Amino acid sequence: MSLSPSGPLTDAFGPNATMELVHPAAPGPMPWWRSAVVYEIYPRSFADADGDGVGDLTGVRAHLDHLAHLGVDAIWLNPFYVSGWVDGGFDVIDHRAVDPRLGTIADFDAVIYKAHDVGLKVIIDLVPNHTSDRHPWFQAAIAAGPDSPQAGLYVVRPGRGAHGELPPNQWKSKFGGSAWTRFPGNATDPVHWYLHLFDVHQPDLNWQNPLVRAEYISIMRFWLERGVDGFRVDNAHALIKADGLPNEAPDWVSPVGNPAAAEAAEHAMRRGERDAPLSAPRRDVGPQWDQELVHEVYREWRTVIEEYPGERILVGEAWVSPPERLARYVRSDEMNQAFNFEFLAAGWNAPDLRTAIAGTVEALDAVDAPATWVLSNHDVIRHLTRLSLPPDQAWAGGLDPNQRMPEPAAALRRARAATLLMLALPGAAYVYQGEELGLPEDASLPENALEDPTWRRSGFTVRGRDGARVPLPWVADAPNFGFSTARVPWLPLPPGWRDLAADRQRSVPGSTYETYRAALWLRRRLELGTGSLARLHGLSGLPSESVLAFVNRTTLVVANLGTDPLRLPSGLMVLHASSDLPLADDDAVLVPPDTTVWIDLA
Ligand code: GLC
């Protein structure tokens, strides 16, 4: 649909300037989650209140005012449950209890209470694909043997070969190596194996078993009754495996028909990426992922959360592609949102970002779901660093001290430009703790500090995700920059982070923190989250290879991804910019490279 542009656009860019509406603004008030900005908290690294070197729930509570002041709408808490801590809490031993290192259930209740009091919703992680191997269910399975009903809660199979000495198939763990480990306990003939798509300490549950389904509904009710506003569903696309657990071959085609995904798998395979660690930007394709029956699970969950008052939500983590596949997870009777990794993986490149944005919005509009936008999380290299690295390094699975790091000021500038672009898009946005302080990836961690299972399972070659999980600096002049009073926190903070500490940035005009805060305030005021998306055509002077421009409601957003400054016509009113704009001799707007501006067309 083409619209006649508003006066200021034609005045500024000439009579040929037109807008093409891709996504209309919401006609009226919408549920909170359709436009929310959600702040992801990795609790171990957020704030340590009890001085043991590990962040905790009381530390989270102590800083909720910081988040309310920043202007986000919700927090998403990564796992805080009793865990083996082999995979940063994603190996859960008890889904209904808080790990003593992170606090108590009373501390959790206090987080919810305070969050709601300051106007923040609370989303928590739910990890349904696997448990810890120390979970009572897996322990009972070991005690009862591989043919027992207890083992039937997991994916346990006899091996291949005369005595089952070979794993049941060739599936690989996302953290490296085989996805199968011999089932522990007494020797059996044939040998039995259990499946773990992730670490050996994370056995996959059998989602064809009704007891597993019932247990997760009960877990959800436990937390819904304590007041959580939603769940982020870990590996939502992994729960159901294809019947018969077939090997994946280069020509493997999904039984639900997905030629594009099959092609992506083939390319990945040819490039030898099938063994690549988790953080590679590939989407998951194969008989372990994105199976039709998984949608039954979410239909049932949706009916559960809707029994509770308030607008509670399900957010899926599903590394599937293309966006049409993702859209299937957010059909009106399934989840509310799913993370959009197309945008995250696009890199700093106008044509790719344009495709990712339009593709996402169109696919999600078809099912009336909001888009989500994310640049950083606890699994990928922080976007400040990643967007300034060559693609092969950006997705190498962690950086090491020999890595040539991008120049800090230039990388920060680019990261802020990307953030302002993201926050101007209609839909929900996810911000990862510390990006509001301009934290880079930390490549300097000593090897003996690394905890990511990728490090071990890759034979100590791929360092993994710890560089994105380094604790936050709160106070420049305190030990460990105010993260913890412990002598040594679980991961050390780099000495160079002093000037990034929150107290050095609050109320400082032009700091990254204040840039985020102003963007969040304006985003709310301009109603960008429930706003529109219009493509622009015929604008003179905006080269499409290096400039991304769109209109949301009455805000023109221009991101300069090129290497030359961009001169916008005079008379435009700049509402916000990701970095300082130089003065031009007339009153033209000069947008330097790696800068995003929001311009008022009203
Ligand atoms: C998800 C989490 C990641 C974890 C994995 C296994 O991808 O985000 O941190 O390692 O699931 O649970």
Image (spheres, rainbow, N blue to C red):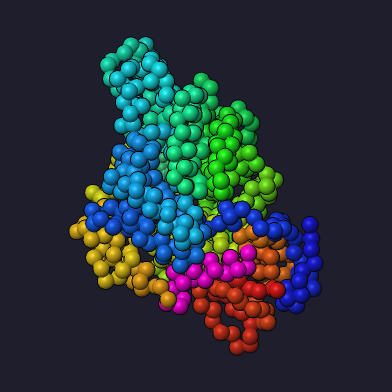
Q: Quadrant of residue 574?
A: bottom right
Decide: is 354 above or below 131: below
Q: Residue at x 44, y 45 (%)?
A: 226
Residue 266 figure quarter: top right
Characterize the magenta stretch by its predominant secondary structure.
helix
Q: Which residues are magenta?
A: 508-527
Q: Quadrant of the N terminus?
A: bottom right
Ligand 1: give its quadrant: top left
Q: Position of residue 308 (x, y in %)?
A: 55, 42
* Residue occupying the point 28% across, 65% down: 481
Where residue 389 appears, as percent x and y from the top left, is: 44, 58
Q: Residue at x 38, y 30 (%)?
A: 203
Residue 190: % across, % down: 35, 13
- Would residue 66 appear left or right of 345 to someone viewing this image? left
Image: 317 above or below 488 = above
Q: Quadrant of residue 252 in the image?
A: top right
Question: Is residue 63 visible in this depiction of the protein?
Answer: yes
Would you say residue 463 is visible in this rendering?
no
Residue placed most toward the observer, 518 or 170: 518
> Relative to 247, is 187 on the left or the right?
left
| Image quadrant where one finds the C terminus | bottom right
Given the current orientation, which residue lies at the most extreme left position?
487
- Which one is in front, 12 or 76? 76
Q: How many marks?
A: 0
Residue at the image position 79 percent from the left and 73 percent from the top:
15
> Where is 157 relative to 3, above or below?
above
Drawn side of residue 228 relative to residue 31, left or right: left
Residue 320, given in percent of the width and then of the height, sits at: 55, 41
* Along the viewing direction, whichever of 74 and 228 lies nearer the viewer: 228
Asked if the magenta segment contains residue 181, the reply would be: no
